[in-house]
Amino acid sequence: MKRFEREKVRTVGFFGHSSEGKTSLAEAVLFRAGVTQRLGNVDEGSSILDFEPEEINRKISISTAVASYQWDKHLVTLVDTPGDVHFTYEAKSAMAVVEGAVFVLGANSGVKVQTENMWREAQERGVPCILFITKMDTEHARFWDALKDASENLEGAKLVILQLPIGEEANFRGVVDLLKKEAYLYEDSSGKAKKAPIPQDISAQVEEERLKLVESLVEVDEELMERYLEGEEISQEELYRCLKEGMVQGQIVPVLCGSALKLIGIDLLMDAINLLIPSPLERRPAKGINPNTGQEEERRPSTDEPFSAYVFKTLMDPFAGRISYMKVLSGSIGPDVAVYNSSKKTREKLGQVFLLQGKKQEPAGIAEVGDIVAVTKLKDTQTGDTLCDEKAPIVYPPVMAPTPVLSYAIKPKARGDEEKISQALSRIKEEDPTIVLSRDEQTKELIISCLGQLHLDVIVERMKRKFGVEVELSPPKIPYKETIRKVVKGVIYRHKKQTGGRGQFAEVHFDLYPLERGKGFEFEEALTGMNVPRNFVPAVEKGIREAMESGVLAGFPVVDVKVRFYDGKSHEVDSSDLAFKIASIMCFKKGMQQAEPVLLEPIMKLEVTVPDDVLGDVMGDLNSRRGKILGMETRGKNQVIKALVPMSEALQYGPVLNSLTGGRGSFTMEFSHYEEVPPHLAQRIVEEAKREREKGD
């Protein structure tokens, strides 16, 4: 691979909502650069960037894809990201490793939730942005409407128009570059522009918009502003410098337009990426923690610094094994060398270093600061890890995975596939850290938690395709518990069994007390006298604990109970640990029946973030779910509702919130405490549990 000076290297990500045309635009760029000989088409399944079968079938991007191209003596690495909210983590991980972002907005649609989400991410990370209004050739394409919507919904940097469209919908045939005051027409399907006079019908508008553009740019530089106000002509070079500085400072976002399908404006976008997106050397120093000292350190983006890289993606290939995508943040690295995984504190041996072209890999030779490369078969390295020089260790903060919103119990369809399902899920979790796997100790179910129904469907398909495991999904069982309401004293149970030879005899006397919620179980030995030898006390406590595993109402575990063992009777021949254990089990169950047993349900603490305009609908829905609103706070343009909601009402909350907010809402959920189930619901739960037990019998 030809080596490029770092000043001539660019890494740019394409971001935006699903179906806005990101992948189509990326394919147009690769075709225009000569990387592909045929324009890749998402709908036809010929895209080199959407190569996973799940992506081809659904015609959407599910995972981040990387490809490189050369344009005007520059090497550009293009990172195409998913636009569906279920795969936000992929897009956020990509935002952490690019030097610039192209936000793709369809001219026939408005700003949607994922565009807003990733726009905020870019602002927080200080990533310079370009807004590209695509699909200018489609029906209902409206440049000015799309721009107005972007101005109203994408906060922070000021949008400045760099290009005006020539025509719209079927008549879209070119663009006017406002800084150069030149028109470019695309008269065939080659994607090559021809300079032409500015059309008369928009010449006045061109002058007006150019004036606004120049005024916005000179605001970046006070000296230029003074010269401009004094009537001096500002050169094109100075205006481009202001444009780039304004982008880097987060003040300005240039707006371009075009059509991926007709290859209009693609070459001008590629020119803008070369001209305006910073090189790796202009990136801010990468900050991390020295694992040996705990102190913050940074690495300048320079080949003179020690090697360090951030692993932002992992692919599990059935043939090649683990493929790790990494961004080199400092120094350089070649093949067949040892590196240090400072996140895991282990050494790794690198084999070949590859450049990526979708799913294809090309040997890169050496990887330098700014490069995105792939390495295979690392032993311990996972997404979010840092690789570095062991003599200069540093750990970069990983991108945090979002909180799962949907949970299901998962089990294999075929008996005996339990081990296969565990292996498949752990491999898929390496690719996708947003999956959370847990085993419910009470229900014994394996629970998979993810970001929504589409996410879950993709996981299930991948398990079948990559690992040959088919699974069954069901809503998780709610881990109800049982407790008592009132004190019961003097509960006596005698266990006596005579079967010839040595018999069984034990008698126990208990007092039962309800405890505060969350206290668990207390056992008090209050024996006096010698009616019960003390060596039987552990068997009594063991019997009670065993009895508490299955309550008298519906067989759920019993909690928050104190048992006082104050008396009993024994037989010097027939008494044994087993006899006292059996007597204790039966005495506890007898006492529970008398102590007003009740069901408890888990209560979850929810933080729900929603736009103002749907606040009432969301609060109404939470109330209908037996939710208790604890309070609200304003966060930017959104409201954050804090509420307590029973787990049974919150398990499938993700799709409901999505529907109520048009995909603009989000929530986090964690366990809070247990509360008594209302009597009318408790009766139904008890009856269902009995039916389940009868079915099992």
Image (cartoon, rainbow, N blue to C red):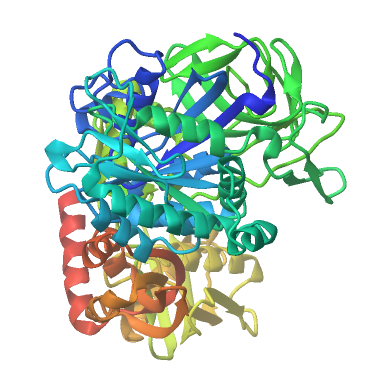
Q: Work out whether 608 lies above or below 286.
A: below
Residue 614 shows in the view: yes
The location of residue 184, given as percent across then percent down, is 33, 31
The location of residue 61, given as percent across then percent down, is 32, 34
Q: Work out whether 278 lies above or below 88.
A: above
Q: Work out whether 383 lies above or below 684.
A: above
Q: Quadrant of residue 266?
A: top left
Q: Closer to the camera, 276 or 348?
A: 276
Q: Closer to the camera, 23 or 597?
A: 23
Q: Closer to the camera, 493 or 240?
A: 240
Q: Quadrant of residue 680?
A: bottom left
Left or right of 90: which side holds 106?
left
Identify the residue at image location x=26%, y=55%.
144
The location of residue 235, given as percent across then percent down, is 59, 44
The location of residue 132, given as percent across then percent down, is 37, 43
Residue 405 shows in the view: no
Identify the residue at image location x=57%, y=14%.
354
